[in-house]
Image (tube, grey):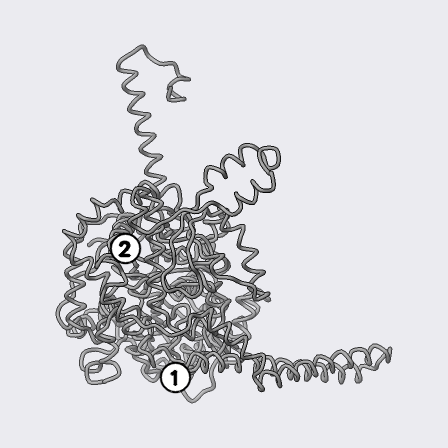
């Protein structure tokens, strides 16, 4: 059995019919062979991805209202949750979303961008494990071991490092171990827990969170296979979709700074916590070969070039599509893909595969008629024949792979060839002339336009003006109270307490006013954009409007610009133009030259003075996109940040495409050459069809806030992937291949010299000369 492979073919109708056999096979792996009267319990945790939330506590904004819930949420819906039978299932909403029990009351940009709340969710998972075990022992009528308010405090304190784990959880562990001993003492063995099986599922940062949770659990929280030092447990199954950590500054920052520190492995995702412990019975990881965003580096389940544990324990499967085409999360019809509905989404394929994989390893999921008889569950697992046919046809074109690098190179080569085909400007092949583009949604305003209109509306909006006045009055009241308290000099303890209470009340009112201001702005976003659905709390224009056609058109224009750089002889047919550098002209007018800035720097800049650009088509925000080097791009970064705060931001000024990495250029030229693309078009109609109808463009809509990827990146940059212990493979390993080839050539040349001439000296052999 291979540890790394392509997915298996999908039969007509999907894999639900195989559920019963898979369930019966898996059940034998987790049943107590002795049939003891003590309990064997099952706890399954479902960690959803960034900006993904289908929690019942978030009823108004649940992803399933738009059929945009992920495969993790769908598997959770299919999970047995029968505490009376010792079976527990817990759903954990993704970072950047509402999680009321953790104190997160709105969608947040810090959660989406930097994974704020990541560690809290790991600890929350542990509190669910402890509560489940306690409930199994104590019974459903007893109070929870850890109340929700106490769990929130524990999560914040543990994850944020305020106090040590043992100090925080010591009493909880004592109570849990104590009730287990009490049952034994009272001869109530049927209420004792003999074995705990833990299963985890995760997508994106949720997959990383699941891995961090398992790492902390086995290393620190419950070492040696014992929870609270006394209750045996084992990690049975890990089901992961396209793991992305990006905790703290993501790996994309390295494209600008080349600092090893910035790799997206901070805090609870660092120090090898992404490694899969060797005593995990089974870990299945399904990853994307077509995702390209640099902010989404992949964490494989390899360690170096191997899979510890072997084929019985680990499985890594390479899937077509980008990040959410594997883990789910797109609504039907997004970007004109999956136009036939929810069942037509490419992500339904890995959902079915993971469902069967989990059942084969004893995860307690609904089977057969339990799913097909429920309209809600039946819809979650529906699978159209058209997507099955397209997927299987793509699979027929795939050759063997032996490494993740093989799979990622195949994915990028396909991606580039398809994009080159859809960049044939002024032809029927061009992206804007394709059916998927014409079916894509497009609102009348872009996010930038909506922001401007909302800003203008707030200047005259009565409710906003009233709230601003309220904030001014509260601020003035706080200042007056502060001066009065200071003028009174010494105050008794009672008076100081009263003053502090009054100050806290004023702060509370001030925060309420600011919150009301934010809610009013969200209402204005919705009203001005003429949207039926509310803008979600904490979000703004970018999340309110849908501009799929705008985004896809921009992606084609960016790719034409990249092709114009790679193939200068094709610039005219691609609509790529040149313009003199404004900075160069300014330097010449000011008389700056070799004396002013240094000859070498001046000459280097002069040689690059001709900037390439492509005119934007029907784009109200920007008239053109320019090609820049990453250093120039980063010099504009602080200006962008400052301009955003002063509302002087002009999108066109920062509408740029960054030059591809030097290590990638040769392959980029080879893979996008006209002959290569013509051959791709002739021989790979199935691959083209999968891209056209089912694979989304994740980078096209990914903005921070108005331009693509807030750090250098683009379609000419390959996705980074990690191979254990925080070690990364960059640029598809092409630099390593080049070094190996160079060393091999030097060795070969040395051998020829030895065979053809006098014996070289030791120094000559060491130097290779």
Say left or right for 680 vs 57.
left
- Residue 717, position in %: x, y? 37, 50
- Residue 372, position in %: x, y? 19, 81
Name the quadrant of the N terminus: bottom left
- Residue 476, position in %: x, y? 73, 80
Q: Is residue 427 above or below residue 743?
A: below
Residue 237 seen by the camera? no
Name the quadrant of the C terminus: top left
Pick whichever, 10 or 155, lies toward us.
10
Dot 2 or dot 1, earlier in sequence: 2
Residue bearing mark 2: 425
- Residue 558, position in %: x, y? 36, 55
Q: Closer to the observer: label 2 or label 1?
A: 2
Check whether the beta carbons of the residues at disc 2 and disc 1 lie within 8 A of each other. no
Other residues around mark 2 within 10 Å, as few (<14) / some (14–19) / many (≥20)? some
Label 2 – label 1 distance at C-alpha: 36 Å
Residue 580 seen by the camera? yes
Quadrant in the picture for residue 318? bottom left
Helix, strand or loop status at disc 2: loop
Say left or right for 710 vs 11.
right
Pick whichever, 49 or 90, lies toward us.
49
Q: Which mark is residue 4?
A: none
Q: Is residue 579 above or below residue 204?
A: above
Residue bearing mark 1: 532
Pick whichever, 185 or 566, lies toward us.
566
């Amino acid at each position: 059995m291979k540890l790394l492979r392509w997915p298996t073919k999908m039969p007509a109708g999907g894999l639900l019919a195989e559920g019963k056999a898979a369930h019966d096979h898996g059940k034998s792996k987790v049943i107590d062979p002795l049939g003891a009267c003590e309990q064997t319990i099952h706890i399954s945790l479902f960690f959803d991805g960034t900006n993904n939330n289908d929690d019942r506590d978030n009823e108004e904004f649940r992803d399933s209202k738009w059929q945009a819930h992920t495969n993790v949420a769908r598997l959770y819906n299919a999970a047995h949750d029968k505490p009376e039978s010792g079976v527990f299932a817990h759903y954990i909403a993704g970072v950047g979303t509402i999680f009321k029990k953790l104190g997160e009351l709105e969608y947040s940009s810090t959660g989406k961008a930097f994974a704020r709340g990541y560690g809290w969710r790991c600890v929350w998972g542990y509190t669910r494990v402890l509560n489940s075990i306690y409930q199994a022992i104590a019974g459903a009528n007893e109070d929870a071991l850890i109340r929700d308010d106490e769990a929130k405090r524990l999560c914040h304190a543990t994850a944020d490092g305020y106090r040590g784990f043992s100090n925080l959880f010591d009493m909880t562990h004592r109570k849990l171990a104590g009730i287990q001993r009490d049952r034994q003492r009272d001869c109530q063995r049927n209420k004792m827990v003999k074995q705990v099986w833990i299963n985890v599922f995760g997508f994106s940062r949720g997959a990383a969170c699941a891995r961090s949770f398992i790492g902390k659990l086995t290393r620190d929280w419950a070492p040696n296979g014992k929870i609270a030092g006394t209750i045996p447990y084992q990690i049975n199954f890990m089901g992961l979709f396209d793991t992305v950590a990006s905790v703290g500054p993501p790996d994309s920052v390295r494209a600008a700074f080349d600092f090893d520190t910035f790799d997206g492995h901070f805090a609870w995702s660092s120090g090898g916590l992404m490694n899969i412990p060797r005593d995990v019975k089974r870990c299945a990881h399904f990853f994307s070969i077509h995702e390209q965003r640099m902010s989404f580096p992949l964490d494989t389940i390899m360690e170096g070039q191997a899979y510890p544990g072997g084929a019985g324990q680990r499985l890594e499967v390479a899937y077509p599509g980008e990040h959410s085409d594997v883990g789910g999360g797109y609504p039907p019809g997004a970007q004109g893909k999956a136009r036939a509905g929810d069942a037509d989404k490419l992500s339904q394929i890995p959902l079915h595969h993971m469902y069967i994989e989990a059942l084969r390893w004893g995860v307690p999921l609904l089977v057969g008629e339990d799913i097909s008889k429920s309209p809600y569950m039946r819809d979650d697992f529906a699978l159209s024949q058209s997507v099955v046919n397209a997927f299987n046809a793509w699979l027929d074109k795939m050759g063997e792979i032996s490494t993740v690098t093989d799979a990622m190179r195949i994915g990028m080569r396909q991606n580039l060839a398809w994009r080159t085909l859809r960049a044939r400007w002024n032809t029927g092949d061009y992206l804007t002339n394709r059916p998927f583009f014409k079916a894509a949604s497009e609102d009348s305003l872009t996010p930038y336009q909506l922001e401007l209109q909302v800003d203008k509306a707030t200047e005259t909006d009565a409710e906003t003006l009233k709230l601003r006045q309220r904030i001014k009055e509260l601020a003035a009241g706080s200042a007056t109270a502060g001066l009065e308290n200071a003028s009174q000099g010494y105050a008794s303890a009672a008076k100081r307490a009263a003053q502090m209470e009054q100050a806290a009340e004023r702060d509370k009112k001030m925060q309420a006013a600011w919150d009301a201001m934010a809610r009013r702005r969200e209402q204005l976003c919705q009203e001005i954009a003429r949207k039926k659905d509310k803008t979600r709390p904490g979000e703004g224009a970018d999340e309110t409007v849908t501009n799929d056609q705008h985004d896809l058109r921009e992606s084609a224009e960016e790719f034409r610009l990249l092709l114009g750089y790679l193939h200068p002889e094709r610039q005219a047919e691609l609509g790529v133009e040149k313009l003199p550098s404004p900075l160069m002209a300014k330097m010449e007018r000011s008389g700056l030259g070799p004396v002013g800035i240094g000859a070498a720097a001046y000459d280097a800049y002069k040689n690059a003075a001709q900037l390439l650009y492509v005119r934007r088509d029907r784009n109200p925000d920007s008239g053109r996109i320019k090609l820049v080097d990453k250093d120039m791009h980063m010099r504009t970064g602080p200006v962008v940040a400052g301009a955003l705060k002063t509302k002087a931001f002009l999108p066109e000024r920062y509408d740029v495409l960054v030059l591809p990495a030097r290590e990638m250029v040769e392959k980029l030229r080879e893979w996008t050459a006209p002959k290569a693309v013509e051959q791709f078009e002739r021989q790979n109609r199935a691959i083209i069809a999968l891209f056209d109808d089912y694979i989304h463009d994740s980078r096209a809509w990914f903005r921070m806030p108005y331009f693509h990827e807030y750090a250098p990146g683009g379609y000419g940059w390959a996705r980074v992937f990690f191979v254990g212990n925080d070690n990364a493979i960059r640029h598809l390993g092409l630099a390593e291949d080049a070094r190996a080839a160079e060393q091999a050539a030097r060795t070969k040349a040395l051998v020829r010299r030895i065979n053809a001439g006098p014996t070289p000296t030791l120094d000559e052999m060491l130097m290779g000369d």
